[in-house]
Image (tube, rainbow, N blue to C red):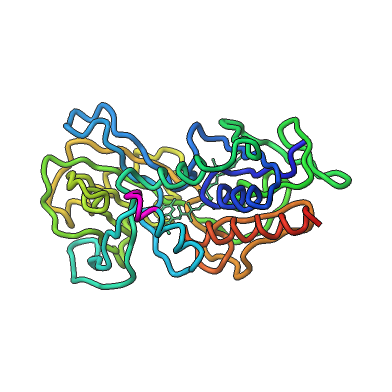
């Protein structure tokens, strides 16, 4: 019997598994995806009719920022090994019609091989004598009993639920808020680069919230944009994501001046929580919870911080 089942192979689950394994505990990581990474999601372009088939695109998180010392160490190692590059500290501001100016902020980091490669990198160094990664397994319930849990046919001393609250609530018949918002992500390949922004926050527009230049963030200058919709717009297109395309492409044309050769739309039903709880995680001695619904601000760094903190807490409790 392994000590802990970690459900979720996104960055929070893998950070949790890393902390548990560092303490010598045995861990099974279960994820329903064919690949790890969760919302640090990368899609390989196929059948686009362009020269970019085989190129990967970030279709979930656009970038991440760093101000936590622990996550900073992890990111520093990725930078040293060429897995992460500082992308930009300046984005444009736009409305739905035109670019309005620029705004500087923190350095945004990106991954030349896509953000998913970072989760896969963390998973690759987990010790195989302590950690088993089981996927794709769609966990449908977590049965909490006397002094332990049963998950996907195996018994464990504890479980870590690492991912969006609605998905994890369903496993333990809980309802824990906060509200989670949807986003549509549209990937478009263009004949050539016609724009001069790295990314643009689109304010006061009912359709788009952000557009990223995937070529500049990944460093190959490919003419690829990825746009994210507003949550309200996404909510109206969840049943049939492709119906979101005309309105999203119209705003993208306003900002880029271009018409794409190929596009696709990805639906994120649970893209982000409306807010994150201030606590880093929850743990009642058997069931732990982590992810970007914790640790203050909904973002990639919080997911890592939350998973790492839960793993350390569980290690202390299960070792004693
Ligand atoms: C469109 C979009 C844009 C974003 N932009 C940014 C950004 O610019 N900057 C930033 O910092 N962050 C951004 N984020 C947020 C960032 O992606 C998340 O904070 C982070 O990836 C969360 O990691 P996680 O491990 O908590 O959850 P997830 O990555 O969602 O991982 C949860 C995992 O659990 C698995 N799972 C769920 N249910 C089950 C089940 N029943 N059985 C088995 N496995 C299950 C899923 O397959 C998934 O792999 C964005 C997210 C989206 C969707």
Quadrant of res 64 = bottom left
User: For residue 308, which quarter of the picture?
Assistant: bottom right
Residue 138: quarter of image: top right
Residue 186 vs 66, above or below: the answer is above
Q: Is residue 308 above or below residue 140?
A: below
Query: Can residue 76 be seen in the rendering of this structure?
Result: yes
Residue that lies at the very extreme toward the right in this rendered image: 146
Image side of residue 250 versus residue 267, left or right: left
Q: Where residue 269 sits: x, y (%)?
A: 49, 47
Say which of 68 and 24 sits in front.
24
At horizontal 34% and vertical 70% (from top left) the residue drawn is 106
- Quarter containing the N terminus: top right
Q: Is residue 100 left or right of residue 291?
A: left
Q: Residue 251's x, y, as percent?
A: 23, 54
Q: Relative to the observer, which residue lies in front, 153 or 238?
A: 153
- Residue at 42% over, 58% down: 75
Front in this rendered view, residue 68 or 279: 68
Say left or right for 219 vs 178.
left
Q: Position of residue 90 (x, y in %)?
A: 24, 68
Does the segment drawn in magenta span residue 305? no
Q: Is residue 278 above or below residue 153?
A: below
Magenta-drawn segment: 78-83
The front one of 78 and 296 is 78
* 80 falls in the magenta region: yes
| Residue sitting at x 22%, y 45% | 224
Side of 287 where 165 appears, left or right: left
Q: How many numbered marks are there?
A: 0
Percent of width and height locating residue 279? 63, 68
Q: Can residue 237 be seen in the rendering of this structure?
A: no
Where the C terminus falls, by quadrant?
bottom right
């Amino acid at each position: 019997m392994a000590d802990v089942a970690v459900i979720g192979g996104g960055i929070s689950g893998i950070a949790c598994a890393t902390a548990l394994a560092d303490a010598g505990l045995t861990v099974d990581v279960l994820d329903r995806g064919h690949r790890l990474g969760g919302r640090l999601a990368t899609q390989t372009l196929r059948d686009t009719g362009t020269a970019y088939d085989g190129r990967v695109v970030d279709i979930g998180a656009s970038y991440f920022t760093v101000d936590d010392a622990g996550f900073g160490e992890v990111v520093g190692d990725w930078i040293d090994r060429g897995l992460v590059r500082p992308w930009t500290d300046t984005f444009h501001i736009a409305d739905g019609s035109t670019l309005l100016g620029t705004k500087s902020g923190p350095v945004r980091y990106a991954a030349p091989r896509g953000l998913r490669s970072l989760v896969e990198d963390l998973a690759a160094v987990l010790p195989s004598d302590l950690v088993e990664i089981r996927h794709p397994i769609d966990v449908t319930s977590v049965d909490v009993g006397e002094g332990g849990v049963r998950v996907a046919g195996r018994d464990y001393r504890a479980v870590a639920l690492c991912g969006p609250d609605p998905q994890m609530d369903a496993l333990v018949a809980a309802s824990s808020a906060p509200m989670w918002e949807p986003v549509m992500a549209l990937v478009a390949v263009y004949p050539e680069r016609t724009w001069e922004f790295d990314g643009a926050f689109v304010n006061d527009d009912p359709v788009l919230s952000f557009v990223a230049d995937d070529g500049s963030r990944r460093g190959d200058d490919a003419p690829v944009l990825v746009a994210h919709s507003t949550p309200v717009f996404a909510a109206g297109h969840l049943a049939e994501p492709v119906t979101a395309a005309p309105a999203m492409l119209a705003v993208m044309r306003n900002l880029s001046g271009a018409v794409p050769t190929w596009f696709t739309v990805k639906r994120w039903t649970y893209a982000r929580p409306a807010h994150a709880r201030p606590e880093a995680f929850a743990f009642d001695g058997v069931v732990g919870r982590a992810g970007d619904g914790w640790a203050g601000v909904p973002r990639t760094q919080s997911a890592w911080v939350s998973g790492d903190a839960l793993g350390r807490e569980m290690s202390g409790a299960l070792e004693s």
